[in-house]
Amino acid sequence: MFHQDDGSSSVTSSPLQMFPMMSASPGLGGSPHTWLEELKSEERGLYLIHLLLTCANHVATGSLENANIALDHISYLASPDGDTMQRIASYFTEALAERILKTWPGLYKALNSTRLVTITEEIIVRRMFFEFFPFLKVAFVITNQAIIEAMEGEKMVHIIDLNAAEPAQWRALLQDLSARPEGPPHLRITGVHQQKELLDQMAHVLTEEAEKLDIPFQFNPVVSKLENLNIEQLRVKTGEALAISAVLRLHSLLAANDEPRLKSPLGPKNANGLSLPHRAVLGTLGDLLEKDFVNNHNGYNNSSSYDTASSSPRSPSAAAKIDGFLNSLWGLSPKVMLVTEQDSNHNGSSLMERLSESLHYYAALFDCLETTLPRTSVERMKVEKMFFGEEIKNIIACEGFERKERHEKLEKWTQRLQLAGFGNLPLSYYALLQARRLLQGYSCEGYKIKDENGGVIICWQDKPLFSVSAWKCRR
C-alpha cells in the first residue's frame, strides 16, 4: 500500500515483491498477467520502468532467456497508443528485442530482408516533427539571425547546410535578406544530404522563392553521407563570406568501431526468472526517472563482458573522424558556424547507461506530444514510431559504426569545437528575443530556453532537449 514517509511515497507489500516468486509461464502456477492489467496508470508506469531496466540488465549480461520473460511481462503493460509511459515502453521494448535478435545475425537479416520505408514517408515524418515541435523552428530562427548579423554588408554569401532536409529555414532567410537596407547579396546555398529527392525538393522551393524576391541565387546539391563528404565538393570560392549550418548531424561522425565482444546468446537462467527490487521508493514518474537505476546497489549490473565496449566512445577512430572534419571546416574560414544538437548523453559505452539516459530524454519528448496531440492521432503515432522509435532503436540495439545516434551534451561539443580552433560567438539579444517569442506562441507553457556554455538549451519543463550554439574561426 502507498503511504507517506517524510513527504515521499513508498510501497510495501507491493506486487513487485511477488515477481520473483511467480511462474514465468501463464499456464503454470498462477499468471501475473491479471494483476498487471489491473494496475493504475502511475503504478503501471513505475513497474514498466523497473521491467525495462531489468530486461536491459539481462540483455547486457547475456541472460537472454530471462530477458525474454521480462519482455513477455512488458507486453501486457506497454501499448503504442496508451499513456506516455506505455507508449515509450513499446519502443524501448522493440529496441531491446532487436538487440537480442542481432545475436542471431541470420535470423535478424531474414526478418528484416523485406523491410521497406519509402523516402516519401521519411519526408512526411520529418515535416511532422518540424510542425509539431518548436525545436527546429527555434534553431532556425537563431541560426538565421546569427547569419544575417555576420553577413551585414557582404555582397557574396555562401551558406553550407550539412543537413539539407528542410527548405523552410532558407526560405525565411531569403525573405529577411530581401529586406536588407543595402539590398540582398548574391546568395549560394550548398545542401548536403544522402537523399537526392530531398535536395531536389529544396532546390525547387528555394529557386522559386529567390525568383519571386528577385535575389541572385544558386543552389549546389551534394548527395553524400556526412562521413563520406569530400570538402572539395562544397566548392568554397575566394571572396565569398561563408556560413555553415549543422543541424542534428555532427553526432553521426562520432560512430566508431567500438562493438562489444558478445557472449553466447544462451546465457544462464536464474531460478526466479526476474530479479526486481523487493522494495522501491516511488513518487511521481518523473521522480522515479530521476533516480539512478543503473548502479550496483540497485541490483543492475553496469559492468559485464557482454555490455562493455572494446574501446570507449572517444576511441581513436571516432576522435580522428570528428576532429578531422571540424578541422576541415575551420580551414574553410567561415565567418559563422551554427551547431544544433540533441542535448543528452546517449554515447555511453554501456547499454545500461544509454538506456537510463535515453529513457529520461524520450520520456520528455513523448510528454511534449501528450500535451500537443490526442492519443488516437495517426500523425502522433507516426512521429513516435518512425522518428523517435528509430532513434531509440539505434541507441539501444546498435553498436559500432552502425550506432549513429551518439548524442552528446553542449559542453562536450564546446570542448571539441574549441580544440578545432573555433571560438564561441555569443548569440545576440535579438536572436534570443525572437526565439522566446516563438515559444510563447505555443499553447503549452512547458517549453523553455536557457543560456548555458555560451549557447542556448531548449527545454521541456526543466529537461534539456536541444542545444544551439554559434562559432567563429579563431586565428
Image (cartoon, rainbow, N blue to C red):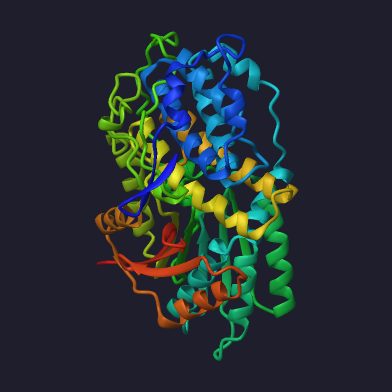
User: Residue 121 versus residue 381: which sits nearer the camera?
Assistant: 381
Residue 210 horizontal side relative to residue 299, left or right:
right
Q: Which residue lies at the image location 59% right of the left edge and 33% below the top edge? A: 77
Residue 323 horizontal side relative to residue 391, left or right:
left
Residue 141 horizontal side relative to residue 214, left or right:
left
Q: Which residue lies at the image location 61% right of the left edge and 28% below the top edge? A: 76
Residue 252 appears in which quarter of the rendering?
Answer: top left
Residue 164 appears in which quarter of the rendering?
Answer: bottom right
Q: Position of residue 362 (x, y in %)?
A: 50, 47
Q: Position of residue 163 (x, y in %)?
A: 54, 53
Q: Position of residue 147 (x, y in %)?
A: 47, 73
Is 247 above or below relative to 453?
above
Is 425 above or below relative to 467?
below
Is 145 above or below relative to 88?
below
Q: Is residue 35 visible?
A: yes
Which quadrant of the figure contains the N terminus?
Answer: top left
Q: Is residue 252 visible?
A: no
Residue 302 appears in which quarter of the rendering?
Answer: top left
